[in-house]
Amino acid sequence: MFVDSALEEVMVLKDESIETVQSLVDQYRPQKTILSSVINHELEIENLLSKASKFHKLSYLSKLPFTTPIAKPETIGADRLALSAAAVYFYPAKNNLVIGLGTCITYNLVNKFHEFMGGGISPGLEMRLRSLNHYTAKLPFAKPDWNAPLIGYDTNTNILSGVVIGMAKEIDGFVNSYNEKFGNFNVLLTGGDTGILASHLKSKIFADPELIFKGLYAISEVNNP
C-alpha cells in the first residue's frame, strides 16, 4: 500500500479469493489499484477492483515510463517491466542496472535516456539448489542460508558455498563488466533472496527488497494519472 509515493505497508494475502480481495478493499478503500498476475486469476477480481478504484491491469499494452528499443514489451516479463519502471521513476537521471533475485536472476539495464536495453537471465537460488538435488543421486537439498562459507566443510556447506558464493561472484562479475562497458551507473538489488546474497557482494549496490512494488506504483501512476 502506498500513501502518495511512499510505500507504507506490504501484505501477503492468505489466498486470491474474491472474499479476500474484497476485505482488503473494504479495509483500505484505495483510490488506485494495479494488478500484475501470472496465474489464471478470477476475472471477478478485475471487476471488483474496477468498481472500487481507478484500476489498471499490467500488460504489454500498458504505458511505460521508458521505451523498449531492443524488444517488444510483450516479450518482457512483468517483473522486469516493474523493476525497470521503478529505476526510471526513482532514479531518472542515472543509468540503472536492476538485478532481480527471484525464481531467476534477471539483469535489467535502463539507461539515462529511459531506454530498456535488455540484460540477462540465469537460474535463481532455489532453482540451483533444487537442481543439484534433482539431477544427482546423492546430493541433498540444501536449505538457503546467508551464512555460506567460502570453503565448505561438509556436503551441505559445500553446496551453499558453490551456490550462494557462486551467485555472489556471478553478480559481482556482471557489475564489473557493465562498469567497464558503460562507466558510472546505479546498481539496484531486489527480490526475496536479497538478504541471503547482499552480504557476500563486493560491488556498491543499493538493496531494496520492495523495488518491484515501487515499480508497479510507477506504472500505475503513468496509466492512472
Image: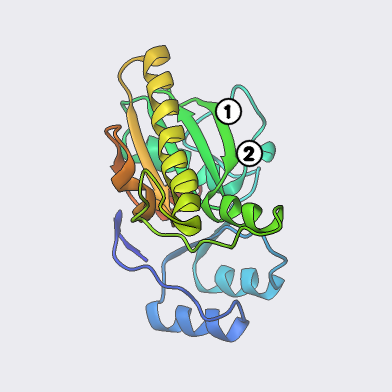
Label number found at residue 183: none
Residue at image coords 62%, 60%? 37
Please tell me whether mark 2 sits on a helix, a strand or a loop.
loop
Pinpoint residue 66: horizontal percent, then vertical percent. Answer: 49, 32
Q: Is residue 90 left or right of residue 74?
A: left
Q: Is residue 70 left or right of residue 169?
A: right
Residue pointed to by mark 2:
76
Q: CA distance from mark 2 to mark 1?
A: 9 Å
Residue 224 visible somewhere in the drawing = no
The quarter of the rendered structure image containing the N terminus is: bottom left
Q: Is residue 74 left or right of residue 186?
A: right
Q: Are marks 2 and 1 in contact (CB under 8 Å)?
A: yes
Pinpoint residue 143: horizontal percent, then vertical percent. Answer: 49, 64
Label number found at residue 68: 1
Residue at image coords 47%, 36%? 65
Label 2: how many Cα within 10 Å (few below 14, some 14–19, many 20+): few
Task: Specify the amino acid type for callout 2.
Answer: Ile
Residue 147 visible somewhere in the drawing = yes
Residue 19 falls in image quadrant: bottom right
Label 1: how many Cα within 10 Å (few below 14, some 14–19, many 20+): some
